[in-house]
Image (cartoon, grey):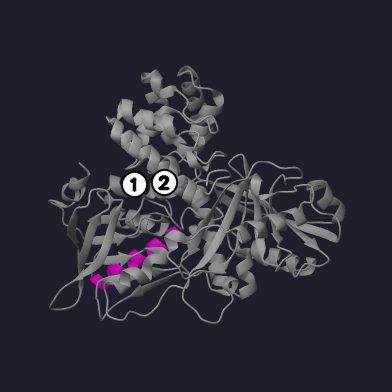
Amino acid sequence: MAQHRLARTLQDHTFDLIVVGAGLNGAGIARDAALRGLQVLVVEQEDIGAATSAWNSRLIHGGLRYLEHGEIGLVRESLREREILLRTAPHRVAPLALMVPVYRHSRRGLGLIRMGMAAYDLLSYDKSLPNHRIYNLSQTRAAEPGLAGEGLRGAALYYDAQVAYPERLVLDNLLEAQEHGACVLTHTRADRILRDTDTGSACGVALSDRLGGARSNAYAPAVINVTGPWVDRLLGRSLSQPKRRIGGTKGVHVFVRPFPGAPRRGVYAEAPQDGRPYFTLPWNGGYLIGTTDTRFAGNPAEARAEPEDIDYLLAATNRLIPAANLRPSDVCFSYAGVRPLPHTAADAPGAITRRHLIVSHAPEATGLWSVIGGKLTTYRHLAEQAIDRMAQEQGWKLPACSTHRRPLPGAWGDDGGREQASLREAGASAGLPAATVERLLQVYGSRAAALIERAQNDRTLAAPISPATGAIAAEILHAFEAEGAQTLADALLRRTLIALGPEAGLDALHAAAAVGRSHLGWDEQRVQEETTTCERLLKDILQPAGGA
């Protein structure tokens, strides 16, 4: 069946735009384009949100650190977009309190921090979040008693926002794009950009189905390369001697269970080794610690957390919170991602701009664009800018962008509290434990109603399949039937998020595959193949403790 996916999707379709890459930027572009009436095809070599969009600090932030580099415009843009996401994606994006402790040896003293916080508040004049507060020494110790006391001068408390599951934010965008006619092909490699033999203009993409092996061409007068750290690789297969665009850096995070002295809120501190700011963030029932920032020139798919990366993060945390005494064996899992930053030879990694660039490849390949850089927070505005620019250059007459005011699928309505209370009642009526219902609300937002209904109509689907997370069988079925999962790894990593639990999804492998057997028609061969492949991927990508 898989070998016919390309034919089924491409037959009888005429596309206006092909989006190569289904990370958050690509998903946002597809959504904006589809909402404006364009016929869109999205192709992704792996699964949605499978790379940079997932392997990050999971923050929607204004970029406090960018003030040091004078990027005032980027900070203002980020703060404005943060506010839009708090309003249009309340099921995904939530306020997060962050404390910045200041020590005698800190590179950034209390006076500089105070000035930065004041500027941050000024630039976010239209925000719904509270202004910052400066804590003296006694207030800081009372607020976060686990912090190291030696040399502590005080702290600043400010607010940003957290997107616990950016994988689901990618999916939300693509679901709405599909509701407005977009086609999405995952596990489909863009081999090269097709170009008109007479004019050299982009006219489509040559595709390979990585699941079934089929090859086909998709045609459109406009193609946008949103492949993140793979941008140069696709251009290299499509253009003659393209200019280098990407200078990626690797960021590593580790996830640990709650530990002695763990902070009550997020902490944004300087690593003692080099003064680089890093986060210790409450997340998913534990703590996410990161990130590193080192140059990376290899295959982005092979970026991994090395022992020295993990040691760096744990040593910084143990210095900041002495009672933590974290060791590599305490790491439930780790992950690494490559930031698709603009290529530059001179700057230190932390100083490279986080601004996005939308590059036209005309006149060599009119109708082809590439996106360089970008961050979670500004994806929506990037998409708006990309569609506006393409419309101008292609001569498209399109309505104005509406994504700044349009709630994403799964968003809570104006009375979100009552909506959630109703779903809790429905979950209880379906016999689901309260903790399971809370998990469904957190992962699926208002779309949890469909999961609860499935569990109520078929009690076998209410069965737990992951002791570590409380996920239920209905989630696996829903991932394949309603959310585009093609493999068990898709379902565990980027639909149900079971793989982001303390057992890295390994506790759910066999029960999840059994749902495929009983409800999706998988034969024993597929059950075995899916289980084996998924286990290998989870151990490779997440490197769980004891999983290698």
State the image coordinates of residue 85 (x, y, percent, origin top left): 49, 52
Amino acid under disc 2: Leu
Residue at point 35%, 49% (across, down): 174
State the image coordinates of residue 448 (x, y, percent, origin top left): 44, 32
Q: How many badges with numbers are in the image?
A: 2
Range of magenta residues = 379-395
Please report whichever mark, 2 or 1, sits nearer to the chain's N-terminal start: 1
Position of residue 295 relative to residue 502, above or below, is below
Position of residue 458 relative to residue 378, above or below, is above
Residue at point 56%, 28% (across, down): 435
- For disc 2, the marked residue is 408
Residue at point 58%, 45% (across, down): 545
Q: Which is more toward the observer, 12 or 484?
A: 484
SS for callout 1: helix
Mark 1 closeness class: few <14, some 14–19, many ≥20 residues within 10 Å: many
Looking at the rendering, which quadrant does residue 21 occupy?
bottom left
Looking at the rendering, which quadrant does residue 220 occupy?
bottom left
Position of residue 114 relative to residue 32, above or below, is below
Amino acid under disc 1: Glu
Question: Seen in the image, is 376 located left or right of residue 180?
Answer: right
- For disc 1, the marked residue is 176
State the image coordinates of residue 88 (x, y, percent, origin top left): 46, 48
Residue 389 visible in the shown view: no
Whether residue 380 is in magenta: the answer is yes
Residue 308 visible in the shown view: yes
For the residues marked 2 and 1, what is the alpha-carbon distance in whole angstroms? 7 Å
Residue at point 74%, 66% (across, down): 113
Q: Pointer 2 and pointer 1: residues touching (CB < 8 Å)?
A: yes
Question: Seen in the image, is 65 located left or right of residue 324?
Answer: left
State the image coordinates of residue 311 (x, y, percent, origin top left): 66, 57
